[in-house]
Image: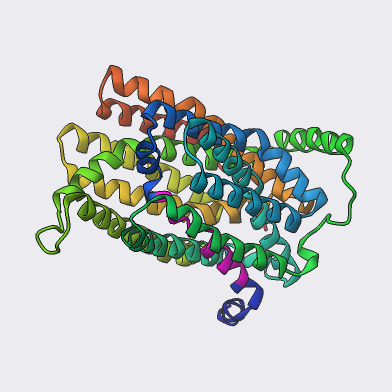
């Protein structure tokens, strides 16, 4: 076993997969996107609409993009994906105003839809080619750890670039470079990972394949339960993290670096937040890299159920911490949730990988992302309504119960390998 892991670590293509994730997460503008939009004259309602535009584009094109990748070429789709991202970054850099930024968000949403699932499907194909498919959890955990390291580096470099250029707008242009590098990296992938690239495109055939693929997935109970568990987890996390971040920001603001360095309060807060997120990503990278070791104790299907229950318990702890105003526990629980989310992704990839047919991988993973968007669209306003009418403590108790119930009805089944 150790010999196989050693071979995997030395494999050039696995290194390319890792580099892909590293470069992809070098979005230097990300920590300051909302600040940039507010400085551009947008109010919070308009910013919310921009995020809705991005989410809507991802939702609409998730499944079609996965089917396109499965039938007409994964490398071709990823090249489109990074082209959309780069166009988005350039529009943000050059443009201003709500409508121009809406166009930028449209292209960003297209990039998200065309990226999700496709690269994971290529990893599956390569592991089959090398007879390493049984070790997909180790491989994906390792490649994801490099993505987290990319995010950690990005959070540090973003502050450095911001201090050097004194303009958040410049971070969009700087972010283009790693995405161009990723395009060249994708071009260097072996042609057999493309799968379907030689097929000529037919819109009628594309629609037929779309309908057939979704019907097939909806009738596959193990896959449906697995992607429901994953998408619900991600949607809940995405919906509640914004409630916790202001508390975390308040804590970080209180630990000012101004008395140690010649910085004003805003600069001190930016550096402090960057440092906190760097720690989060480094811990997540380490956890993701070593999650495969848990498979010696439990299968990925069982681990998905266990982590879901841990997530529910974490929500209950947050409810109690909010009730009794224990800010440090709230912040620690958020950090734990972030790590848990990044732990769970390799587990999901391993579990669902044993259930999918070879020609539907990108489609299944796209359906999972689309379900996440649907859950988010529904849950976010519901959570906001509950918080407004009651309290955050009641909200987190409600969420905890929802997670427990979902884990019962969408329990991930065991699949013999």
Q: 377 and 404: which one is in front?
A: 377
The residue under the point 40% across, 65% down is 153
In this picture the colour scheme is: rainbow
Which corner quadrant of the image does residue 82 belong to?
A: bottom right
* 369 shown above or below 170: above
The residue nearer to you, when weighing 339 against 108, is: 108
The percent position of residue 87, horizontal first and vertical second, equals 60, 48
In the rendered image, the vertical position of residue 48 relative to residue 181, given as above or below? above
Q: Based on the picture, tell me whether residue 397 belongs to the magenta stretch.
A: no
Q: Residue at x 49, y 48 (%)?
A: 93
Residue in front for this viewpoint, 252 or 130:
252
Q: Main secondary structure of the magenta part?
A: helix
Q: Is residue 104 left or right of residue 284?
A: right
Question: Is 193 on the left-hand or right-hand side of 250?
Answer: right
Q: Which residues are magenta?
A: 16-30
Residue 118 left/right relative to 195 = left
In x, y percent, where is residue 365?
A: 65, 46
Quarter holding residue 309: top left
**Number of marks present in the image shown:** 0
**Is there any visible trace of residue 25 in the rendered image?**
no
Quick one: quadrant of the C terminus?
bottom right
Q: Residue at x 60, y 38 (%)?
A: 58
Q: Residue furthest top?
A: 389
Image x and y of residue 217, in percent: 72, 38
Report whether 49 appears left or right of 82. left
Q: Decide which of 88, 303 is in the foreground and name it.
A: 88
Depicted 155 relative to depicted 10: above or below: above
């Amino acid at each position: 076993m150790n010999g196989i892991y050693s071979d995997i670590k030395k494999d050039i293509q696995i290194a390319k997969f890792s580099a892909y994730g590293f470069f992809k997460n070098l979005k230097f503008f990300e920590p300051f996107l909302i600040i940039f939009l507010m400085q551009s004259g947008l109010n919070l309602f308009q910013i919310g609409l921009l995020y809705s535009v991005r989410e809507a584009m991802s939702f609409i094109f998730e499944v079609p993009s996965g089917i396109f990748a499965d039938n007409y070429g994964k490398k071709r789709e990823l090249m489109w994906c990074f082209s959309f991202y780069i166009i988005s970054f350039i529009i943000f850099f050059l443009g201003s105003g709500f409508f121009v930024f809406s166009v930028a968000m449209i292209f960003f949403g297209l990039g998200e839809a065309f990226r999700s699932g496709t690269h994971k499907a290529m990893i599956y194909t390569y592991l089959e080619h090398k007879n390493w498919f049984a070790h997909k959890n180790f491989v994906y955990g390792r490649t994801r750890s490099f993505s987290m390291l990319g995010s950690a580096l990005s959070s540090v470099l973003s502050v450095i670039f911001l201090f050097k250029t004194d303009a958040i707008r410049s971070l969009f242009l700087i972010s283009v470079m790693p995405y161009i590098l990723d395009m060249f990296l994708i071009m260097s992938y072996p042609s057999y990972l493309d799968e379907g690239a030689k097929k000529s495109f037919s819109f009628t055939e594309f629609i037929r394949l779309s309908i057939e693929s979704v019907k097939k997935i909806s009738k596959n109970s193990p896959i449906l339960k697995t992607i429901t568990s994953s998408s619900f987890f991600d949607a809940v996390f995405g919906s509640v993290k914004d409630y916790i971040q202001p508390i975390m920001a308040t804590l970080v603001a209180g630990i000012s670096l101004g008395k140690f360095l010649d910085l004003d309060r805003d600069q001190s807060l930016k550096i402090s937040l960057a440092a906190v997120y760097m720690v989060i990503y480094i811990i997540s990278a380490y956890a993701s890299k070593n999650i495969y070791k848990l498979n010696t104790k439990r299968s990925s299907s069982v681990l998905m159920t266990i982590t879901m229950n841990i997530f529910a318990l974490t929500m209950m702890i947050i409810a109690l911490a909010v009730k009794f105003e224990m800010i440090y526990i709230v912040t620690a629980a958020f950090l734990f949730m972030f790590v848990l989310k990044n732990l769970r992704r390799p587990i999901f990839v391993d579990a669902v990988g044993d259930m999918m047919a070879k020609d539907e991988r990108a489609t299944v993973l796209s359906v999972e992302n689309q379900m996440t968007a649907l859950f988010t669209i529904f849950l976010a306003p519901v959570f906001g309504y509950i918080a407004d009418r009651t309290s955050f403590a009641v909200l987190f108790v409600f969420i905890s119960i929802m997670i427990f119930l979902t884990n019962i009805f969408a329990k991930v089944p065991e699949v013999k390998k």
